[in-house]
Image: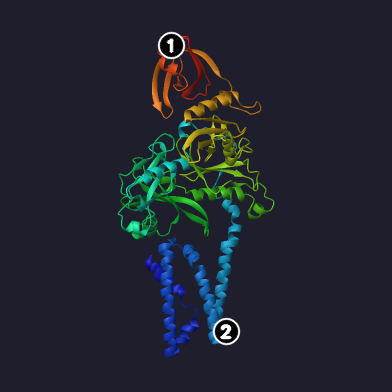
Amino acid sequence: MFIYSLLTALLFLNPIPSLWVTSFKTKKGSRLFLYENVSRYMIGVIVSFFIFYVGLIDVTWHGILSSFAIIIILNLLSSASLSYYYEKKTTLSNRGAFMVGCLLAAGMAYMWIVYPAQTAQDRHSLPEATVEMDVMESASEENIRVVPYGNARYRSEIVFGELDNSARYHLGESSIQKIDDELYWVSPIEFDGLFRWFTTDHVPGYIKVSAENPNDQAELVDTYEMSYVPSAYFGENAKRMVRSEYEDIIIVSESFEPDENGHPYYVFSYGYYEFFRHGNKADGVVVLDAVSGEMERYDLDDMPEFIDQGVAEMTALNYATWFGQYGGGFINRFIGRDGVHEPRRNEMIGVFNADKDMYWFVDHERPRGSGNTMVGFSMINARTGEMTYYGGQEARGILNGNAARDRVDRAFEREQWIGTQPVLYSVYGQYTWVVPVVDRNNGFQKIALVHADSGRVVYADSRREVFNEYQNFLATGLDEDIDIPTDMANEVEENLTVERVTQSTDEDGTIVMILFEGKEQVFTVPVNRSQLALFIEPGDELLVQYIDTEEDTIAIQNYRNESLDR
């Protein structure tokens, strides 16, 4: 980087050729001119060093031009004007320098202002989005997170506060990750300033919190001494290490991602610009070992399996924005607005599908929309960058995230609990907002499901319970004019014989699991709903009511043990 600073410092020298000739005709003039340009060069070295070393710009022709353009323009115009002032005449050199400065200023104004407008429709096509008119694939209970960001952050900060010398560090940004096929919120521990970094060899690890079980405690993972982190300085700064090794890549952002064994890595997403310095498209990642400092570069197609966020959130948000705003071109975005829609917020939410693949999600609305409904939503695969826009009839006109959260807030107005971080899923073929409910201190209270079409709210203490309640709601509680899946339309009641019975314990408490003769599915009864379930034995005859969702596990809505006559 220092070599680049020495070279680009030449851009600070006086650009008027005639002055270099005339100034050396006298001893005094040559001395003053030399002092001036030595000073210019030293200032140029300092400024260039800050641009390269502190700003960490990509070393590409457009990166350097974009960073130094204003300096070059000001140098040309000011030097030409001073030459005219001192020489009292227009020369070919100062006139040429002034014209070059004006042309460069006009050219950069075009590239920064006009060119983005001209390429607007091209950016609409850049994500190569697929428009899907059908309802997206239904999510299973296991891949829906119920612990919101605020609650995870609150519990992580409690554990962080128990660290020895915690004042030396601060808690990094929390992000959702899949580790060993389970969802967690992970938060790296970072240095808190230059002095703390200078007097400390490493940070003591990271904190993870289950995103699936609100009863799990936050855990400090302190088996790894992390020295190479974004909050370190000089040669140990994670981003500076990546920039030193890969000078020409366009670094978009970094994410903290432990592998399946819990080993900490920083993943730097990078891309390339399709149109000068805009239209960034995801291209790959650089993976940095936070313990050893070793790094490896991968294309998106070749990333290690443990990486969830190969495509940066900013890139995904740009994809969704360009796709929605520029379908009819730049002018149509402001005049006419035919077909224009845009993300409802300036952030994406990470969600996981049935295969535990991460997607960036955001709902779309019309410009100056009502604030209650959406016109569709985007799902961008966080590993491949593939974008799907769901804009079918079922997605248009349903509640957006704000409206779903408002419904939940009203449902718990007396308790003064609030909904937070709503995420849209397809649950049993119905678009449904999953909204964790917390108190004013971010303590987890309930999990709510909001039917996105009708606005009805169903809630319970745990994920399994709320899914059972939602099954019952879909079978019995929807309006007649709302189309529901055929497998949810009728409740089944039949006499069955118990073949096997066992118990399991999870975040919902004790669950009795039953195999009936002639049935392939596993039927479940929570003990907290029926203490008599503990006395079910093989051979018992049960009159069972349930909703057949054709899933492997089915919740029993109601039952009577005919063998016990109760």
Q: Quadrant of residue 4?
A: bottom left
Q: Residue at x 45, y 88 (%)?
A: 29
Task: From the top left corner, tell me how far across and down residue 361 is, in percent.
Answer: 52, 42
Q: Which mark is residue 540?
A: 1
Residue 416 coordinates in the image, percent (x, y): 54, 37
Query: Which of the image's four quarters has the N terminus?
Result: bottom left
Position of residue 445 relative to residue 332, above or below, is: above
Residue that mark 2 sits on: 90
Q: Position of residue 407 (x, y in %)?
A: 59, 36
Given the image, on which type of amino acid does mark 2 rest?
Thr
Q: Is residue 282 visible?
A: yes
Residue drawn 31% across the image and 50% down it: 291
User: Considering only vertical position in the picture, is 48 above or below 564?
Assistant: below
Q: What distance separates the C-alpha of mark 1 from that of mark 2?
A: 107 Å
Tag 1: residue type? Asp
In the displayed structure, 511 sits above or below 455; it is above
Q: Quadrant of residue 520?
A: top left
Label 2: state its secondary structure: loop
Residue 235: x %, y % from top left: 34, 59
